[in-house]
Image (tube, rainbow, N blue to C red):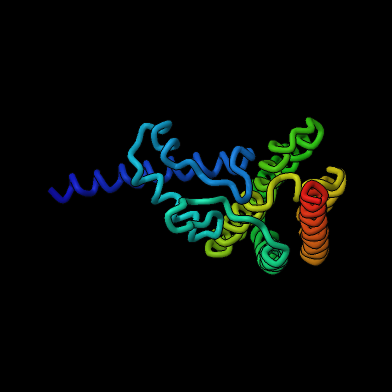
Amino acid sequence: MILKKKIKNSKGKDLTREAYNDIRKMIFSNELKPGQKIPYREMAKGLKMSLTPVVQALKHMEFMGLVCHEQNKGFFVEKVTPREIDEAYELRSIIEPKMLAHTILNLNKQGTKRIGTALNEYLDACQKGSLKLKLVKDIQFHMSMAELSGQNLSISILRYLFDFLYLRFGQELIFSRPSEDSADAHTAIFDAIKSKDVETATMVLKKHIKEIHKNALDGLQNRLSEIEDIIF
């Protein structure tokens, strides 16, 4: 009896995870935009599951600050604010350099190869010009460095920050600046990592995060200006 209950709970978690990933993909691909209502009933039918796992997934996303719930209205994709951009990037500027220092101190040939592969995939994505692919490879590059740090709690926080930034703010806010800027920064970080130069690597990373922070704020301001032009 206990075993059957555990199996049932496990299936429920799998369905919730499936629903979460499906909603996440829709936000990531701009099928669902900030302020838009989430058609969770239609989603449940499309996924061939009950409403329960879909609602559970949305409640988890509400806890993460990715969606909001309005009484008798439903769930909506959260809108972005400059203050949240500031806070998210300030956290990145604290967490990532600290993790990178641990990564370099513990680095071996296998780890160096892993980061190098992630860099090459990112540079290749920049050449192909796909914004979505570039975004995915950018995250993978940063996470490949972070995951080698051994700082498990910080890794979880950083993974959440990436979801928060890129699902809430949109690709165009993060990458409105020419790709060469980030490509050069990523390459410089990797060169310093190979040399085990902690000071240079962390300095370049901090500068890189500062630049994309500014880029995100500029992108948001441009978006808000465009909305005002349409209204007036």
User: Residue drawn at (48%, 57%), measured in percent from left and top?
Assistant: 70
Quadrant of residue 49 within the rendered picture: top left
Q: Residue at x 68, y 67 (%)?
A: 87
Q: Nearer the viewer, residue 125 or 151?
A: 125
Q: Position of residue 92 (x, y in %)?
A: 68, 63
166 with respect to 231 (left or right): left
Residue 189 seen: no
Question: Residue at left 56%, top 40%?
Answer: 25
The answer to which quarter of the image holds residue 154 is: bottom right
> Which is nearer the eye, 30 or 147?
30
Residue 74 % position (x, y): 46, 51
- Residue 207 is situated, as x and y percent measured from the top left of the image, at 83, 62
Q: Residue furthest front?
A: 232
Compared to 143, does 207 lie above or below? below
Q: Is residue 36 left or right of residue 182?
A: left
Where is residue 6? Give x, y as percent: 23, 49
